[in-house]
Image: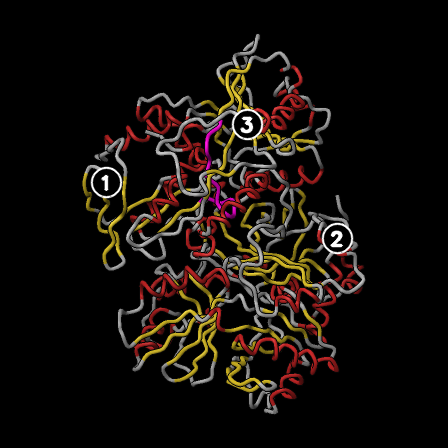
Amino acid sequence: MAAGTTRFCAGIVSTARPVSIELKMADYSNKLYQQLEQETGVKTGYMKTGSISLAQTQDRLISLKRIASSLNVMGIPCEIITPKQVAQLHPLINIHDLVGAMYVPEDALVSSANVSLALATAASRNGVQIHERTSVSHVSVQKGRVTAVETDRGQIQCQYFVNCAGQWAYELGHSGEEPVNIPLHACEHFYLLTHPLKEPLASNLPTIVDPDGRIYIRNWQGGILSGGFEKNPKPLFTEGRNQLEIHNLQEDWDHFEPLLSALLRRMPDLEALQIMQLVNCPESFTPDMRCIMGESPTVRGYFVLAGMNSAGISYGGGAGKYLAEWMVNGYPSENVWPLDLKRFGALQSSRTFLRHRVMEVMPLMCDLKVPRWDFQTGRQLRTSPLYDRLDAQGARWMEKHGFERVKYFVPPGKDLLDLDQSKTFYKPDWFDIVGSEVKCCKEAVCVIDMSSFTKFEISSTGDEALESLQYLFSNDLDVPVGHVVHTGMLNEKGGYENDCSIARLSKRSFFMISPTDQQVHCWAWLKNRLPDDSNLTMEDVTWKYTALNLIGPRAVDVLSELSYAPITPEHFPSLFCKEMSVGYANGIRVMSITHTGEPGFMLYIPIEYALHVYNEVMNMGQKYGIRNAGYYALRSLRIEKFFAFWGQDLDAFTTPMECGREFQVKLEKGMQFVGQEALLEQKQNGVYKRFTMFILEDHDTDMDLWPWWGEPIFRNGRYVGKTTSSAYSYTLERHVCLGFVQHFDEKTGEELVVTTDFINQGEYEIDIAGQRFQAKAKLYPFSSLFTHRRRKDEEELSGYQRE
């Protein structure tokens, strides 16, 4: 029992997590472990000690304040405390270099092996059979479904299989008849155990987390258990020759020395400590530091729960709950997309990639993560044909689903090094650069390479494609050839599994554009629901087309000169798609859509023509003031126009009715589609959350902390929701946040319908790291005619004096 990495873990149950779903899992685990002993009679060693996360810098304190804001609105007690208060709670801690800390009084300690035993005992009583010392050789699959598991004691027939093999999950995934990619990799993880101190430590002493020192410290039988996440981790088992059973690896005191030094700096009175042993056990890490759960995109009934990034005991209870719901109901009760196996593609399963990435991930467990940071390893893996051209022009890159995308372009003469190392919670150094890109999008013309978009072609010999898509998508796709439809791909609850644009290329052929990270999820969703019909074909053509977004009022001039075709609104109306020649290149799919609300066109270019078309566009555009732009400008434009993006604002628990998109749903047309019943019910009864736009009013862009996403929203002093995305609007000269507002009965806490009046009649504040800023709520974007400029608002704003 409990032979995996969690058996050796430090037993710290911590709810202080930056990702909302991880926070909820840890909170559930804490509550579950609290009652386990009573339910099962198995001692779990549960002790509520609380935890203190230390900050040695102001930036670290800001990051803790952001987490504290989330914990407080979730109902988890938490406070930011002074160094003096740290010393009162834990007298052995050296506080001279601290600027503050976060205290979470309900965090706990457990014995992880005993928790596993208690859970297994409870499961056995409920009829679960547990076969110890039984190895699985492979999983049998027929017609894309799990049918049985082959073990060294014979075959077990089953409809569902859950790969919870921890550091062995990768190998087990690849051992089946149909390989399942589970991108994780083991690293050595060290912690120290000491004999009891002369004056044994009290068992209820708070756990210390010192991220700037890269260590954690907890009481252990009157002595100390202390480990950490070093800057130079040691990956293990890259060749796949894994231990059959986890045991303690070799001690390596030289490697542990920086962590030991950090411990002695933090607790100087420990010099005379007697060390019992240095534990070295493997721990598995994932490419993005989030655990992996969910159903395989390739094998139905094959579920995964692994890659806990050293937080297995904190997440275990909550992760088990969500996975059980997923298997029984077909979906979990919360949005688990940040943890879904389908966020990864096969490209993240290269052993070299995983080895290099976990060497970066493990130190990042403690590194300060300011908004918009990027991984440095595993880069330049998927690139547009224009990568070198754009890079030579000053492109600064970020990565999404392995694809390189431009953030912004550094103008000649700017200090590149300064800009690359600029990391802050305040106004970033790229502020003016992005501002000039936005200005060009609004006044002239810009080009953004958006090749990373997921692109599918769906066609049939008869009407099968149209009939199937009409059922799977919420908007009416039976439009004239050449029209583009913006539509949701909804689940039975009416929530967005995908948000996409579909162009009708011919009577029987459709071109579907989806977000970058939808490539695996959307393919699996459609494959599992499209009829198994040889007349119907779906092809992933993401790699076949380079996508250029031509944004701005002069885009029409550039395109018409290059194509010798009329591009006026009469010939080329909004949401239209036409195959055209651009320069010498034929077969360019041009769509009158920019995903920003600004005028312009998307050009889908066969990759062999990409460089030619780009050069032609840039040369022709010179007289119109053309320039390159990146995704930061795109974000600012789309947020000020109140455009929701899937994966940030929209998810499987968000419906078109809740975000003002009723007009994109064919409810009145008498056609059946997935999610229809849920939407009809919402139309009749109202919605329990509303997508809302907030303009910050008393916020100083230069001096105050910036909102990024995940900030609590308060209405008349009561918590009503969180922001989902935000950006500075260079047009409004204000920060704009998008988020969902809910309405709870003040006495009972019951969810109530959110009406337009409820939104419009409230006084709103956005909490940024514990400081609240007044905000104006809108259910529609500002018209450019009524643009509020800061200079005209000085008198109005002077009424809001900061406290």
* Of pointers 1 and 2, the one earlier in the residue sequence: 1
* Of pointers 2 and 3, the one earlier in the residue sequence: 3
Which secondary structure, mark 3? strand
Q: Nearer the viewer, residue 261 or 772?
A: 261
Q: Vertically, is 579 above or below 424?
A: below
Residue 151 circle label: 1
Q: Nearer the viewer, residue 598 or 7?
A: 7
The x, y position of residue 732, in whole percent, is 71, 64
The x, y position of residue 162, in whole percent, is 31, 44
In magenta segment, residue 765: no
Q: Which residues are magenta?
A: 280-291
CA gap, disc 2 and disc 3: 34 Å
In magenta segment, residue 286: yes
Q: Vertically, is 770 above or below 120?
A: below
Q: Amino acid at mark 1?
A: Thr
The crowd level at tag 3 (other Cα within 10 Å; few <14, some 14-19, many 20+) is many
Mark 3 highlights which residue? 227
Mark 2 highlights which residue? 417
Q: Are marks 3 and 1 in contact (CB under 8 Å)?
A: no
Q: Please give the name of the residue rendered at 58% of the width and 78% of the height, measured from the top-left corner.
A: 601
Q: Vertically, is 272 above or below 312?
A: above
Q: Vertically, is 622 above or below 223?
A: below
Q: Are marks 1 and 2 in contact (CB under 8 Å)?
A: no
